[in-house]
Amino acid sequence: MNDLEILFPQDQAVTVCGTSAKVFAVKLRDMQAFARLSHGLLELFASISAAKLTAFCAENTKQIEQLLGLQTSLTKKQIDSLTANEAVIWAYQVVRVNFDFFAQALPALIQSLPDGPESSRD
């Protein structure tokens, strides 16, 4: 992956339940909301049940809608028509794609730091 791809990751096309959309890289201004929702999703998936899924959706409806509106090419109408299961799957896809972006960028970032791994060996 070259520097431009790390700085400007390509949107990733994703299909969930027959609906296709692009997932975008999270912007710095949205990082705090993204991190909170990611944490909640990861906890949900660690021990998922119908009751926990229902509770998560009830507690995070606005955050999920906001995340999908900012981080995907889904329209407001598409987001409003999602079932709870579809919304959680889309939110998971946003998290997965962005974790992939972070994982790809991290080694290059560390190498570029003035006191990164290369300089610590001196």
Image (cartoon, helix red, strand yellow):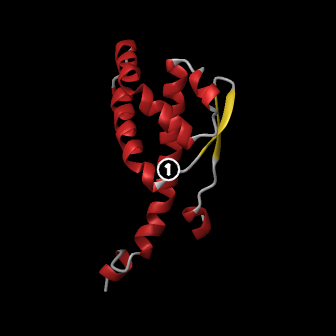
Q: Look at the picture and state if 96 lies above or below 107.
A: above
Q: Identify the residue at the far top of this view.
A: 51
Residue positioned 36% across, 27% down in the render: 44
Q: Look at the picture and state if 102 lies above or below 83.
A: below
Work out whether residue 93 or residue 61 is closer to the camera in this orientation and state it: 61
At label 1, the amino acid type is Val
Q: Quadrant of the C terminus?
A: bottom left
Quadrant for residue 121, please give it.
bottom left
Q: Identify the residue at the far bottom of this view.
A: 122
Q: Position of residue 38 (x, y in %)?
A: 39, 39
Q: Position of residue 105 (x, y in %)?
A: 49, 61
Mark 1 Cα-neighbour bin, 10 Å: few <14, some 14–19, many ≥20: many
Residue positioned 52% across, 40% down in the render: 94
Q: Position of residue 7 (x, y in %)?
A: 55, 64
Res 2 seen here: no
Work out whether residue 64 or residue 113 is closer to the camera in this orientation and state it: 64
28 vs 70, left or right, is left
From the image, tell me which residue sits under label 1: 26
73 vs 84, left or right, is right
95 vs 42, left or right, is right
Element under disc 1? loop
